[in-house]
Image (spheres, grey):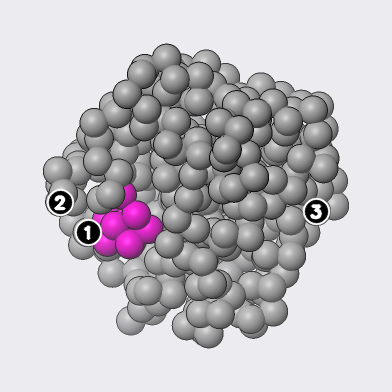
Amino acid sequence: MTALYPRPDPYAQGMLDVGDGNQIYWETVGNPDGKPAVVLHGGPGSGCSPWWGRFFDPAAYQVVLFDQRGCGRSTPHASDPTTDLSVNTTAHLIADIERLRAHLGVDRWLVFGGSWGSALGQAYAVTHPERVSELVLFSVVEGSRREVAWITRDMGRVFPEEWARFRDAVPEADRDGDIADAYARLLAHPDPAVREKAAIDWCAWEDTHVATAGPRKHDPRYDDPVFRMAFARLVTHYWRHGCWMDGLMPAAAGRLAGIPGVLVHGRRDISSPADAPWRLAQAWPDAELVLIDDAGHGAGHPDVTTALVAATDRFARLRPGP
């Protein structure tokens, strides 16, 4: 088993104005003269904790961590019901990544992301392939409407009792439709009590559908009402729109030609099945697919950790070209 590197402390940090009234929080850790890497957190809306920096050798990498629009330390925060989510889309996030790259004077960087961050990493890379030296992605998803339907409806076959509660928390007229859309409307309700209940119910299902490998664990982040509300608003906002990525991948994977990549995925990640990274690897010959037989969603399994650290260690020896 490969251990994570020690928790890094930032050597620089700040707020970057990205337009539309939004400012994103960023920080850099590791070696200021090291190989650049940018981390794309999950959610959408999870925020970027110091844990993400531990996948990189601090002597070899200059690692950029940032909170995507509306979450973490970025402002305005999506927990505020008046925060305008119409200027929070995948295209906005891709533009933010580019603004941050230019702000920090980085030419090309390794892109590292998990879950939603893996989808955003793919979207960024096919939009700006000249700015990506390598991709390291885990819990790989496409950001498609089919995946949203799988999580919000089909996973009820795995957790029928919990899914029934999740479904029955929306108005009866909405139960056979787009559940993410129904929850998004509840989260925009003028009554704070309705909004709060919807956030609690949404996050209870989030806790459930990823629990397909090992003992079920409650995510303590959902106990924080500010985190819970921002997370639920952002996830439902993105999912009701198919993450603005529906059909993008793996169709656009040809744009990744020549970019090395590693895709790490748990075979027991039932809420995000392994066919997505498999399809991507078939369309992107420069990618290596690593399937971990007894791992689920996320990077908590020791073999997932080992594979991710091995990838960043290997790519540390590859300096970005012109």
First reached walking from the N terminus: tag 2 or tag 3: 2
Q: Residue at x 28, y 27 (%)?
A: 80
First reached walking from the N terminus: tag 2 or tag 1: 2
Q: Which secondary structure, mark 3?
A: loop
Q: Which secondary structure, mark 1?
A: helix
In the image, 303: left or right of 144? right
Mark 2 vs mark 3, CA separation in Å: 40 Å
Q: Position of residue 81 (x, y in %)?
A: 29, 28
Please state which amino acid type lies under the numbered disc 3: Arg
Please state which amino acid type lies under the numbered disc 2: Gly
Q: Position of residue 7 (x, y in %)?
A: 49, 32
In the image, 122: left or right of 311? left
* Disc 2 crowd, CA 10 A, few/some/many (<14, 14-19, 20+): few
Residue under pointer 2 = 19
Q: Quadrant of the N terminus?
A: top right
Does the CB distance between marks 1 and 3 fall below 8 Å?
A: no
Which range is magenta?
88-96
In the image, 8: left or right of 322? right
Residue under pointer 3 = 267
For discs 2 and 1, the disc positioned in front in the rendered view: 2
Q: Residue at x 44, y 31 (%)?
A: 186
In terms of depth relative to the viewer, which is nearer, 153 or 243?
153
- Res. 92 in view: yes
- Residue 99, labelled with which disc? 1
Would residue 275 be counted in the magenta stretch?
no
Mark 2 vs mark 1, CA separation in Å: 10 Å
* Main secondary structure found in the magenta portion: helix
- Res. 31 in view: no
Q: Residue at x 28, y 49 (%)?
A: 86
